[in-house]
Image: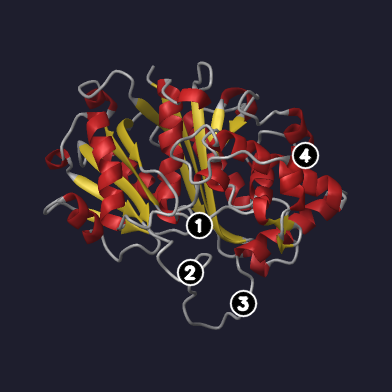
Amino acid sequence: MAGIRDKVAIVGMGCTKFGERWNSGVDDLLLEAATEAYEDAGIESKDIQGAWLGTQSSGYSGQILAKALKLEYIPITRVENFCATGADAFRNGCYAVAAGIYDVVMVAGVEKLKDVPFTGLSVQDPMGSYVFPNTPPPVQFALAATRYFHHYGLSYEQGKLALARVAVKNHRNGSLNPKAHFQREITLEQAMSSPMIAWPLGLFDCCGVSDGSAIAILTRPELAKRFRDDYVLVKGMGVVCSARQGLLQDDYDFVHFEENVRAAAIAYNEAGVTDPPKQIDHSMVHDCFTITELITYEDMGWCPRGTAKEHVESGFFDLEGQVAVNVDGGLKSFGHPIGASGIRMIYEVYKQLQGKAGKRQRKNPTLGAIHNIGGYPGSFTAAVGIFGKRD
């Protein structure tokens, strides 16, 4: 399998401020992100030859994007794949460029989640023979947390403190980001004593629900030089879907997510990553809940199994650490409009590799990564992307 390493370049990106965007509709959010992306790439809407739109609930076809940006009579495909929606839309755009089908394409993600009377994610299963208990996302990941604590012999206080450190880190990073939904730091005491949502996960262990949009402009590397010198190369993309093994197999351990491991292996192989904690400088991971981030550290190969707690305590994943995780605040602080999140992650990696991340800037980053996971514990879709500077 040849992969897409160095066959696709990002030459422009845009991202809205995430949050409760009561005065902005889907069209407004897409236009806001597109305006920044167009200016960044130095192009106009007429230069876009094809597009992909990632959204879970903010529209039923690519016509949403066409209408907002006046992209008339070009192919636009809507993509939906749980919380990996944005990353999967990006992967589809990459493949079209790498195949030589188009010279310049757009990948957009958008979600307007605050205008509905629903406090979480509105997801419906198709009718069939499955009978699921009432386990919304906080309950699902709370079960993963209790199992992780038990498996590695952590007391409630030990495990809860490790999760609190993840929340504090991400809020500290988000406080440096003017586009983040939540732009304030929190203390360990606040994280430890916050109201319980689903034991052992408290309020500050759970990400918010946000409105927002993010957009990427892609082309081939040989064409990228026409747009800018500091373009960013796609080094590898891995997306995998499970067959609900975790719901069917009685030996599934629930202290790792196999989908993460498989997606990371694909992306690492394409990118030539053989020593992840030494080669990956920074990463945006899917911290829908603090336990998800903690497990992802181990699934991505950044620390041995069962040692995430010690690595968090040592500052290994801090902004100044070995592998800086969620340097833009993550889902926890930046926010989580489902279809936009994966592309928002790429936006931060893009800025970091260009040296344009402001107060969050890492020193001389070489490789950055993104990660998404969504679905049910034991039945996930996961996406991992690796990005680097031009050679």
Return the disc, 1 or 4, that comes first in the chain's sequence.
1
Which of the pair 149/332 is nearer the observer?
Answer: 332
Tell me, yes or no, if residue 96 can be seen here: no
Return the disc, 4 or 3, that comes first in the chain's sequence.
3
Tag 4 residue = 309
Q: CA distance from mark 3 to mark 1?
A: 23 Å
Tag 2 residue = 122
Q: CA distance from mark 1 to mark 2?
A: 11 Å
Tell me whether the residue at label 3 lies in contact with that at label 1, contact meaning CB atoms closer than 8 angstroms.
Answer: no
Q: Quadrant of residue 299?
A: top right
Q: CA distance from mark 3 to mark 2?
A: 15 Å
Q: Is residue 308 above or below residue 157?
A: above
Q: Amino acid at mark 3?
A: Phe
Return the disc, 2 or 4, that comes first in the chain's sequence.
2
Tag 1 residue = 209
Question: In front of the other: label 3 or label 2?
Answer: 2
Say few, some or many: other residues with alpha carbon within 10 Å of mark 2 (under 14 / 14 to 19 / 20 or more): few
Give the quadrant of the N terminus: top left
Q: Kindly identify which numbered label has been placed on residue 132.
A: 3
Q: CA distance from mark 2 to mark 4?
A: 32 Å
Q: CA distance from mark 1 to mark 4?
A: 27 Å
